[in-house]
Image (cartoon, rainbow, N blue to C red):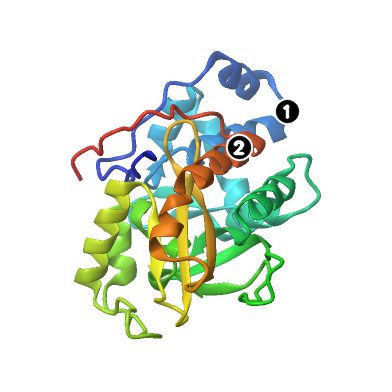
C-alpha cells in the first residue's frame, strides 16, 4: 500500500539544527550564499518565523540575518508580517519555484519519467501544484487515445474536484486549509462534485489515510482520475502525480490498481528533483 499523507504540524515552527556545511557557508561565504542559507531556512519552516528564531536556526548573528532578510524583502522574495514581525516565503520566490519546476531547461529527466508512465499505463498523466484553490499543471503528457481531455501545462482545474488537487489539499496545514476554504463556494460541475466543506474535509481525511486520491467524474462527466503525492525525504508533499481517463476505459477500480505504479513513478520524480528518497514502508499519521 502507498504511504499515507501527512499534514504539516500545527505546532510553532520547529527550529532545525544547522548543518556544519550550512553554517560555514553562511559565515564565510559570499552574500549570495548567505542569502540562500536564509531562504533555505525559511522554506524549511511550516509557519512564519521571527528574526531571533531564524538567527538561532542558522547559528548566525542577528544583524547578519537581518541584513539578508531586508534585502530579500525588498526583492519580493520574502514577506514580513508587521504585526508579529515574522517572515515567510514571498510571491517572487514562489513564482520562481513554480517556473523552475515547470521549466524544460533542467537536467532532471522529469518529462521522460512522465512519458514512461504514460506509455506503461496508456493514460494521460500530469504533475501539478496547488495555487490557491486551483490545481496547476506544471507538466502534462497526453495519451495516444483519441478519446481524452485536451489540456496543457499551465492549465488550471479546481482542486476540490480533481484527484491531484485533493492530494495537495489533504497535505496542507489544517489551519491554513480552513482559512482557505472558509466562506468559499465550492462550485458543482457534475452530480458527483463535492460542494460542502465538511464533506470535502471527510474526503481529504480518507486521502490522508489511504495515501492517494480518486476523482469519480467530479469535474467532467465520464472522466475518472487518481493521484499520489510527490514527497521529499522528510515526508513533505511538494506536488501531485495524477492520471485520468474516460470511465469506460478507466473505472475507479482500475484507477486504484494504478496506484503502485504511480507511487514508484512519484519516487523517481522526487529523486530527479533532488528531494531524496523516502522509505516505502507504511507510516501512520500523527494526531492532527
Q: For this rendering, which residue is in front, 265 or 181?
A: 265
Which image quarter: residue 11?
top left
**Residue 252: which numbered mark, if any?**
none
Q: In the visual, does 263 lie left or right of 252?
A: right
What separation in Å lies between label 1 and label 2 (alpha carbons)?
A: 33 Å
Measured along the vertical axis of the image, is residue 17 above or below residue 140? Answer: above
In this rendering, the label closer to the viewer, 1 or 2: 2
Residue annotated with mark 2: 268
Q: Residue furthest right?
A: 105
List x then y, in percent, for residue 170: 34, 55
Q: Residue at x 21, y 70 (%)?
A: 199
In the image, residue 181 sits, relative to residue 26, either above or below, namely below
Q: Secondary structure at mark 2?
A: helix
Kindly state the secondary structure of the residue where label 1 is placed.
loop
In terms of sequence position, does the residue under pointer 1 or pointer 2 come before the other?
1
Q: What residue is drawn where x is 58% and y is 42%?
A: 265
- 198 or 27, nearer to the observer: 198
| For the residues bearing labels 1 and 2, Cβ distance under 8 angstroms | no
Amino acid at each position: 500500500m502507498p504511504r499515507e499523507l501527512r499534514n504539516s504540524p500545527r505546532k510553532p515552527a520547529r527550529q532545525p539544527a544547522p548543518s556544519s556545511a550550512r553554517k560555514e557557508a553562511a559565515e564565510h561565504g559570499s552574500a549570495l550564499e548567505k542569502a540562500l542559507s536564509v531562504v533555505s531556512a525559511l522554506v524549511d519552516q511550516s509557519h512564519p518565523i521571527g528574526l531571533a528564531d531564524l538567527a538561532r536556526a542558522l547559528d548566525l548573528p542577528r544583524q547578519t540575518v537581518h541584513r539578508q532578510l531586508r534585502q530579500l524583502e525588498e526583492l519580493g522574495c520574502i514577506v514580513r508580517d508587521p504585526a508579529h514581525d515574522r517572515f515567510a516565503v514571498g510571491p517572487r520566490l514562489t513564482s520562481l519555484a513554480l517556473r523552475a519546476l515547470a521549466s524544460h531547461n533542467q537536467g532532471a529527466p522529469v518529462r521522460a519519467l512522465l512519458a514512461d508512465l504514460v506509455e506503461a499505463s496508456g493514460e494521460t498523466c500530469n504533475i501539478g501544484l496547488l495555487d490557491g484553490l486551483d490545481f496547476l499543471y506544471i507538466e502534462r503528457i497526453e495519451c495516444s487515445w483519441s478519446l481524452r481531455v485536451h489540456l496543457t501545462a499551465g492549465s488550471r482545474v479546481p482542486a476540490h474536484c480533481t484527484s491531484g488537487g485533493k492530494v495537495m489539499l489533504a497535505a496542507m496545514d489544517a489551519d491554513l486549509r480552513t482559512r482557505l476554504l472558509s466562506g468559499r463556494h465550492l462550485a458543482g460541475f457534475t452530480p458527483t462534485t463535492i460542494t460542502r466543506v465538511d464533506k470535502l474535509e471527510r474526503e481529504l481525511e480518507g486521502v490522508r489515510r489511504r495515501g492517494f486520491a480518486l476523482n469519480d467524474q467530479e469535474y467532467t462527466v465520464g472522466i475518472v482520475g487518481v493521484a499520489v503525492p510527490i514527497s521529499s525525504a522528510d515526508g513533505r508533499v511538494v506536488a501531485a502525480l495524477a492520471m485520468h481517463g474516460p470511465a469506460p476505459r478507466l473505472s475507479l477500480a482500475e484507477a486504484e490498481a494504478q496506484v503502485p505504479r504511480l507511487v514508484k513513478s512519484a519516487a523517481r520524480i522526487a529523486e530527479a528533483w533532488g528531494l531524496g528518497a523516502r522509505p516505502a514502508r507504511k507510516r501512520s499519521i500523527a494526531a492532527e
